[in-house]
Image (cartoon, rainbow, N blue to C red):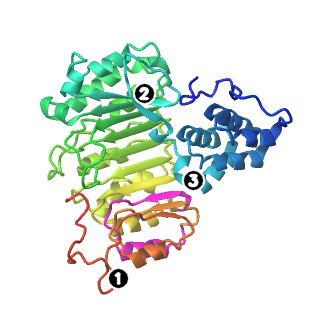
Amino acid sequence: MPETNPQESDAVLGGQNPPPINAAILGGLAGAKQRLESESIVAKIQALKDTIQYGTDGINLALEALADPNDDVKRFARRLLRDRAGEAGKAALLDREPLSYFTTLADWRWEIYNPEIGIVDPENNAYVVQMTDSWEYSDRYDSFLGHFESLLKDPKIGELKALIVKIEQEFIFTEEDPFAKALAAICDAGNLFANLRGLYIGDSKEEWPTGYRRSKLSVSDIRPFLESFPTLEILQVFGRFTDDEYQDEGYTSLNCAGLRHENLKTLIIETAHLAGENLNQIGRIELPSLEYFELWLGKIDIFRYRIAKALKPILFDNASPNLKYLGLCSDNDTDSLIIEVLTSPIIDRLAVLDFKMGTMTLKGAEYLLNSPDLRNLKYLNVFGNYLSESTIAKLQELPCQINSDSPPYPAHEGGNWDRRCEGHRRWALHE
């Protein structure tokens, strides 16, 4: 195999140059450590495979590989610690690199599917298909689903582990309901994806100028995905979860009540427009294996008691007993939402709390600082909130990793962020 495309089953070849005559050939743990210093990616991955038989010392070597300059080596080390090194390996990974503990689409390289090349590495690549009417693709494919249909004809389609479906802006405005058409096409072909573990579907826009998850793509439903793919472990959806950004009461597009999925580990809903009834529907999905839940609450005013009520199965009813990552992002009243989270029974088992792009002020930060139930927390994300430099400094005293990589905001009397200050950051998702 090429050096840039290693497989777990690859044979490990020697270097192009013979070793010195007096070179020692090391075996065991010392040999694995020596091979991890090689320039060969394949040799490093083979060495990592060998480390897990050496207990704690082997786990420590795999932890060191998390800092390797090659992304493939780092990705393999994460998988090894999480999936093949037992509870000790998972615990060590959670302590060292908490975000890598979770199964997400970051486990794969994203590669645009090229029918002329085909599916080459389904174990390590997530293949991207574009749904668009743009000239770039219309010259090569006969319809808006042409790129996806070409993927379905690939002889290795049954080996695909991760699928990325991006719906481009041109398609959104030229088709009546592009999300529904994409959903139907994917679910109708469900029997072809025998090994699919991860699925992303949504707007192709990677980064909006404001950094928020704003989209014009209306999401019709997510229930069919979960029903069509019972072994799916990751579902990530990016779009609008309401027809009208100002409409809330009485609107619903999701139908998730009574739905149960046994294997889903990660659910990510990225949106700037979330209707209250859709929030209720999301909260009613039964996900006993869920470990990672990230929900963007959007700009519509959904009061904290309604959020807590909608998420009651998760926060209070132990519907997801394995949950370790809770992300409630871009909320209009993060301080009040923090109270609901801190008073829920799940707080003492969470490893990651994610409040990015919200409206947290000193008040919310103090709730976190004074909580006695964050003893198991490994990572706190407060990126993009209303926090002064001094408040960020206080949070950094917590015994966990902190992500606060956003410009600090000045505080007024009493320590809270003064929205009247010139150059202030506006309310989440109102940019």
Label located before the other in sequence (2 or 3)? 3
- Which residue lies at the image location 37% right of the left edge and 56% below the top edge? 328
**In the foreground, 279 or 150:** 150
The residue under label 2 is which amino acid type?
Phe
- Label 3 secondary element: loop
**Residue hosting label 3:** 97
Within-10-Å neighbours for mark 2: few <14, some 14–19, many 20+: many
Q: Is residue 363 left or right of residue 173?
A: right
Is 407 a magenta residue?
A: no
Q: CA distance from mark 1 to mark 3?
A: 32 Å
| Residue 257 in sight from this viewpoint | no
Within-10-Å neighbours for mark 1: few <14, some 14–19, many 20+: some
Viewer-side label of 1, 3: 3
Q: CA distance from mark 1 to mark 2?
A: 49 Å
The residue under label 3 is which amino acid type?
Glu
Highlighted range, magenta: 348-373
The residue under label 1 is which amino acid type?
Gly
Label located before the other in sequence (1 or 3)? 3
